[in-house]
Image: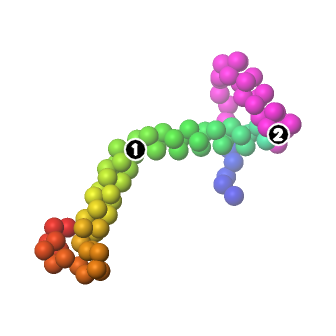
Amino acid sequence: MPEKIKVSFYIDRDVWEDFKYFVFQKHGKLHGVLGKEIAKALDMYVSSTIEERNRPVIISILREIDRLNKHVSNLIEYNGFIRADLLGEV
């Protein structure tokens, strides 16, 4: 289990009240779940930020995979033999 730390911060009252309302609606209580939901929200934010930063790299990799898949498809003819003329293109 990860080490827990106590944090203190200021936040807009409306945002805090909306968040507590959300947590209460989800769990029917705040005690014992509010901190977990804050940690979960922070983790989701960090993860989405990392994903957004990596999006161009991921798109580039997916395009390369698609290109390679098309190349492999071209290598294999319908009769199952590999076309020797295409082997040098990869």
Range of magenta residues: 6-32
What's the image's color scheme?
rainbow
Residue 25 magenta-drawn?
yes
The secondary element bearing badge 2 is classed as helix
Location of residue 65 (image quadrant) = bottom left
Up-down relation of residue 76 to residue 49 (above or below): below
Tag 2: amino acid: His
The CA distance from mark 1 to mark 2 is 33 Å
Using residue 62 as the reference point, say whether residue 74 is left or right of it. left
Using residue 44 as the reference point, say whether residue 7 is left or right of it. right
Residue 67 magenta-drawn?
no
Q: Residue at point 29% right, 80% down?
A: 80
> Would residue 61 be seen by someone viewing this image from the given angle?
no
Residue 51, given in percent of the width and then of the height, sits at 46, 44
Q: Residue at point 19% right, 76% down?
A: 83
Residue 72 - label: none
- Residue placed under numbered mark 1 in the picture: 55
> Would residue 23 be seen by someone viewing this image from the given angle?
yes
The secondary element bearing badge 1 is classed as helix
Tag 1: amino acid: Arg
Q: Residue at point 28% right, 80% down?
A: 79
- Residue placed under numbered mark 2 in the picture: 27
Q: Residues within 10 Å of mark 1 (few under 14, many from 20)?
A: few
Residue 77, given in percent of the width and then of the height, sits at 26, 74
Q: Residue furthest front?
A: 79
Q: Nearer the viewer, residue 33 or 1?
A: 33
Up-down relation of residue 80 to residue 4 (above or below): below
Q: Quadrant of the C terminus?
A: bottom left
